Amino acid sequence: MTTKPNRHSKKRLSLSRRLQFSSAAAIGFGLVAMVALDILLLPLVMKIPRELYLMGFIAAIPGQGIKSESQGVRINSLGMTGTAPSGPKWENEIRILTLGGSVMMNRNMTERLEAKLNDASSQKVQILGAGLSGHDTRSSVIKFDYLARYDFDYVLIYHGINDLWNNHVAPDEFRIDYSHRCPWNRRNVILDNSLLCRLAFNGWPRTKPQTVVNGSGFKSAETLSKNLGDLIHKIRAKRSTPILLTFAWLLPDGYTPEKFKAGQLGYSNPERHVYTPAHVWGPPAYVEEGLERHNASIRQLAKENDVYLIDTEQKIPLDLKYFGDVCHFSDEGVERFIHEVVEFFRTNQLISFRKI
């Protein structure tokens, strides 16, 4: 015999359903609010396009300049330097991407290289400068994953000194993705697609590894090689051409922080424009050995993978007139660097040049 529910049980059932509906509605509203916050509100507050923030590496807020650059580096809509690609490539257009650290944006490197190539070429050359201050090879792998959509013909990769930062931890603290130094380097599906999760992860209290000068014993040379190898593979998969460059640098004899600060070492940088002491990366002897190891890795990688190589370390004379500090070029150094790149493109017939 089936018992019919009485009025009280019906009321309890109705209340239970209303509570379930209210809970589901609250959850649904919360999810909608989180999506709105993630997609609409946070980008407005941060004044940075959502995709750029998720990538994590831009020079400055698009439309603004960099005040520390005495020549006033212009920032494009991608938060980088040079020409931001838009739309499909024209038939006679050449797109070039540059990857590296501050050397590749110092003294308007991108704009000056683009202008010089356009002066010499019968094709239209556009260069996006994704070489940004403090960036290392891991940064460039992450950036290229985002920027590959723009169908570049050539990718110039100029790295060396910034990877040296990552060695200053005990061996068990070193992480091959360099995440021990920067939380941006940790990537996964969630962190790559949610602003809320990225903000929470980057801001999560964590104990930074203790600084131990070269405690990892130049492990960066191995990681640099791996990162550049990954870049070569990714660039070729997009039917683009990678071009590796060795890293140019100059440490005068008797280098000390005191002499550097007093301007007694002979660098050509009277305006103190991007004037960075070598000790930012480590003791001079460490910087010297580290760069030699990194350049050896770059040359070996180019040979093993049959990649174009501009041996910048050999091409730029060890003359203080070309350097504003240990690695940033003086104005004359920028011109010499650009000359070597242009002549490399000419010699290897990578773009069409006007007849001289």
Image (tube, rainbow, N blue to C red):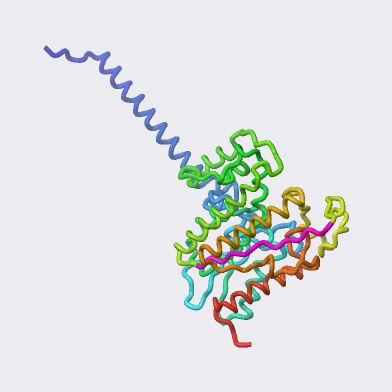
In terms of secondary structure, what is the magenta stretch mainly? loop
- Quarter holding the C terminus is bottom right
- The relative height of residue 74 versus residue 349 in the rendered view (above or below) is above
Q: Residue furthest bottom?
A: 356
As rendered, which of 11 and 23 lies closer to the eye? 23
The percent coordinates of residue 273 (x first, y second) are 78, 60
Q: Is residue 175 magenta?
A: no
> Magenta segment: does it hold 245?
yes
Q: Is residue 134 left or right of residue 274?
A: left
In which image quadrant can residue 302 be found? Answer: bottom right
Relative to residue 46, is residue 78 depicted above or below? Answer: below
Q: Position of residue 116 (x, y in %)?
A: 65, 76
Q: Name the quadrant containing residue 4.
A: top left
Q: Looking at the image, which residue is at 34% across and 29% down? A: 21
What span is colored magenta in the figure? 241-253
Residue that lies at the very extreme toward the left in this rendered image:
1
